Amino acid sequence: MILAIESSCDESALALFDPKRGIIIERISSQIELHSEYGGVVPDLASREHLNNFPLLLKELELEKYADQFSHVAVTNGPGLAGCLAMGGILAKSIAFVYGLPIITINHLRGHAWSPFISLHENDPKGFKSKLEAQLPHLGLIVSGGNTVLFEIDTSLSIHILAETVDDAAGEALDKGGKLLGLAYPAGPRIEILAREGDSSYTEFPKAMGNRKDKRFSFSGLKTSLRYKLDKMKQSDIDGNLSSICAAYQEAVFHQLIKKTGQFIIEGNYKSFGLSGGVANNLNLKNKFNKLSSSHGIPFYSALPKHSGDNAGMIAFAGFIDLEYSLETQQNDFVNIEPSLSLIDR
Ligand code: ADP
Ligand code: MG
């Protein structure tokens, strides 16, 4: 059984994964409320909260019940906030020491990359490997607060990045746009709710990234364009049309995601498409990708809501994949913290 730890940003999370059954138990403690006061994550506060929260989560997990079944400790080693990653690293080392276990380090983005397949395993642990292999090569999109990465998992299970954002991430674009509109952090889910009542044709935003060969996303222009629009509007007009402004802005962010992904689906020979990261919670986006995938005749896998934002279930699952396919050299120690590494290819 793999005991997994995630602490890269503002969520402290633990999970236990049994290769024969899937995720047995997972717990998460979010700091969103604490940081929303500041309009974004405050690194030092985040590290302090991990220190407070992990002991409470550990108690809930009742580790002693499973102690004789543990095989590995999996822990996120980056990318993330250095102080936060170190908290998870210390916990991993302590648990590994107490139970005499090896540690496997997991890149946070690899956790997101594999998360759409957690259910495929859980529904049929025995048949998982052959079912997974039938889904390869796989095209995946991670859309989170810190990253927007389009990647493929090839038939030998290696991950290759195809396109990344050159400035803001999709979630960041939603959060920053929402901030301009006076919405609390994180604004992504608030924009989704408001947008449901709005008319996305209310205003137009510039459509970036039209070129097929352009292997990148860019969202910072959208935010600037929103700022200029709002500067020209009266506050009463903004308030009266808030849901339509949200709908139009969200549509512009999603248009770019869909368009770029569509180009790669057409050019590649993918057997499946997967969506993950916090923005994958958005039902509008999920519906759009569902349609895109089915129009190209490939199955769509979306991470479950509980595995979309930061969580330890996905870290355990990525650890399971690494062990199952001998992908990573196992490390007996937490050797590297990689706070600024944002690559998932090796
Ligand atoms: P990171 O770890 O990179 O900060 P997460 O995977 O935790 O990102 O996701 C957080 C991001 O997801 C935030 O930018 C948030 O606004 C966005 N998000 C969460 N739920 C939704 C939603 N329903 N619609 C749009 N964006 C969302
Ligand atoms: Mg994340």
Image (cartoon, grey):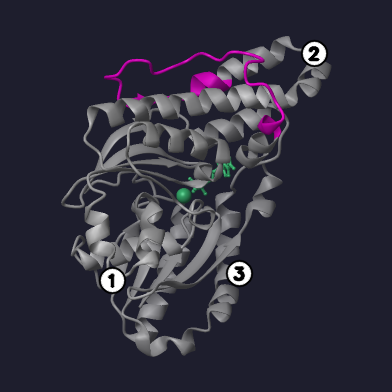
Do we see residue 169 in this rendering? no
Residue position for label 2: 234
Is disc 2 placed on a helix, strand or loop? loop
Instruction: Please report contact status of discs 2 and 1: CB closer than 8 Å, yes or no.
Output: no
Magenta residues? 194-223
Does the beta carbon of the residue at mark 3 sit less than 8 Å from ligand 1? no
Above or below residue 157? Residue 273 is above
Residue position for label 1: 126
Residue position for label 3: 52
What residue lies at 32% left-to-right and 40% top-to-bottom? 298
Above or below residue 113? Residue 54 is below
x, y percent for residue 153: 25, 46
- Mark 1–mark 3 Cα distance, whole angstroms, equals 38 Å
Q: Observer-nearest residue: 323 or 182?
A: 323
Residue type at mark 2: give it: Lys
Q: Observer-nearest residue: 149 or 18?
A: 18
